[in-house]
């Protein structure tokens, strides 16, 4: 009995780790990791952060022996620079930290908090509309959270998805922010592959699934790859751990999210001294800036407009904001006026857009011997690493039961 996992993103890697018996992973790309991967030169495709509430993702890290590679860069609150007025301060990510006035986001009054709590209740509306009466809180806390967690502009973001996030980050420790100390290669993908190999899982790279053959009973009977067709045995099963557009191509009968949002990352080749840092910018181009010893990486999520701009236009603007951050928070080392070499990575379909009234995902076990996985298969939470890991494990369970 063999489980064929299609796709070696986080959903596929988690599914392969959870599946029992013989497991083969078929991945189209030369490298594993999917949308959370190291590029050929070792840079991350984009900065990935986890929070304490991401229990599935953190459990996966522990399972593959990689938990220690994820560090909390800002335990004292997130350093944030407001480009509108130059104010630099630390903001607690959890409302539990807002008892300290100096850690409270702007506008976090009783009424604004009440409106935020209502988003965690029933109903599904656009977040910006629901928080319109609290513009300072919307700008200083809700919008950055929505863009980071849902990768969807706040004007169109689903309050139901945000509510699911809010219900989870309220617990003690749940808003602790973690990043990979060295990078997604050494701190995520490589340990996952090592754990799978240690369990005897076979991984085939460069193996793009072109089509599925189904029998009369609806079971998958063969997998079509460029290098040939693989016939399945009676007890064999398939986990499709693919992005929505690929799952929809292979199974046109299922409905998949059609609208996606881009994420732009700018990687500056700049050596720094000191520990890993993670800083925020309000009212600028940069949203988050990750400082590691060898690079400074800027993240712009829900980057509809920025993804259309050229790297030549974006680089000097981003670097000027980084220098302002470095000055405001006394980052060690030299931060010269001239931008260092910069590489822009634009992920056009980074995640689905999460809008009010989105239809639920299809059933997990959509065919008798085929289960679906992928960040978009998560019914409650937004599409993230955590959602991908949960979906992979759920798919493996669905086929075992
Ligand atoms: C720039 C960026 C920043 C992000 N930041 C964060 C963050 O801070 N925190 C967070 O939790 N999440 C973040 N995310 C989202 C996170 O990366 C994704 O939710 C997650 O990686 C999706 O995993 P997946 O396995 O569902 O899909 P994918 O990673 O897309 O994996 C699918 C795999 O299937 C392969 N494939 C496709 N077609 C075929 C085929 N026909 N046959 C075989 N293989 C195929 C692909 O090559 C890929 O490896 C970010 C995403 C991006 C792009």
Image (tube, rainbow, N blue to C red):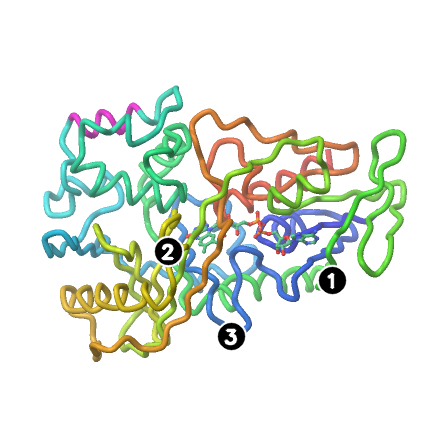
| Label 2 crowd bin: few (<14), some (14–19), many (20+), radius 10 Å | many
* Residue 350 position in % (x across, y down): 49, 50
Q: Are marks 3 and 2 in contact (CB under 8 Å)?
A: no
User: Which quadrant: the C terminus?
Assistant: top right
Q: Earlier in the sequence, mark 3 or mark 1?
A: 3
Marks 2 and 1, the one that precedes in the sequence: 2
Pointer 1: residues within 10 angstroms few (<14), some, or many (20+)? some
Residue to which mark 1 is pinned = 204
Which region shows up in magenta?
111-118
Q: Secondary structure at mark 3?
A: loop
Tell me the tag on residue 41: 3
Q: Is residue 153 above or below residue 201?
A: above
* Left or right for 357, reference 230: left
Q: Tell us which disc is closer to us: 3 or 1.
A: 3
Q: Quadrant of residue 155?
A: top left
- Judge left or right: residue 289 versus residue 152: left
Residue nearer the viewer, 96 or 375: 375
* Upstream in sequence: badge 3 or badge 2: 3
Q: Which residue is mark 2?
A: 178
**Which secondary structure class fits the magenta region best?**
helix
């Amino acid at each position: 009995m063999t489980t064929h996992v299609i796709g070696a993103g986080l959903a596929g890697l988690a599914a392969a780790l959870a599946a029992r018996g013989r497991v083969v992973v078929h991945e189209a790309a030369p490298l594993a990791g999917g949308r959370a991967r190291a590029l050929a030169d070792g840079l991350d495709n984009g900065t990935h952060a986890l929070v304490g509430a991401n229990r599935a993702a953190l459990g996966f890290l522990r399972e593959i022996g990689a938990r220690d590679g994820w560090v909390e860069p800002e335990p004292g609150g997130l350093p944030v620079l407001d480009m509108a007025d130059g104010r630099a301060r630390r903001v607690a990510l959890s409302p539990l930290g807002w008892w300290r006035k100096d850690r409270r986001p702007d506008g976090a009054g009783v009424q604004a908090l009440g409106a935020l709590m209502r988003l965690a209740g029933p109903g599904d509306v656009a977040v910006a509309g629901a928080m319109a009466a609290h513009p300072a809180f919307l700008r200083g806390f809700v919008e950055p959270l929505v863009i980071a967690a849902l990768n969807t502009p706040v004007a169109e973001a689903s309050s139901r998805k945000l509510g699911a996030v809010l219900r989870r980050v309220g617990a003690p420790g749940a808003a602790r922010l973690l990043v990979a100390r060295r990078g997604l290669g050494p701190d995520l993908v490589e340990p996952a592959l090592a754990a799978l190999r240690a369990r005897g899982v076979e991984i085939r790279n460069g193996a793009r699934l072109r089509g599925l053959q189904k029998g009369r009973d609806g079971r998958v009977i063969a997998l079509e790859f460029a290098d040939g067709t693989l016939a399945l045995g009676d007890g064999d099963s398939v986990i499709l751990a693919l992005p929505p557009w690929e799952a929809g191509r292979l199974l046109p009968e299922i409905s998949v999210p059609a609208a996606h949002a881009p994420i732009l990352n700018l990687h500056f080749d700049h050596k720094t001294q000191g520990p890993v840092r993670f800083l925020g910018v309000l009212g600028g181009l940069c949203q988050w800036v990750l400082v590691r010893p060898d690079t400074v990486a800027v993240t712009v999520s829900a980057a509809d407009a920025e993804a259309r701009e050229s790297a030549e236009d974006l680089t000097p603007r981003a670097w000027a904001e980084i220098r302002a951050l470095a000055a405001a928070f006394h980052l060690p080392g030299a931060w010269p006026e001239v931008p260092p070499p910069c590489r822009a990575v634009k992920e056009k379909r980074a995640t689905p857009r999460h809008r009010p009234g989105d239809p639920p995902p299809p059933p997990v076990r959509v065919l008798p011997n085929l289960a679906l996985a992928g960040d978009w298969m998560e019914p409650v939470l937004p599409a993230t690493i955590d959602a991908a890991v949960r979906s992979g494990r759920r798919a493996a369970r669905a086929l075992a039961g």
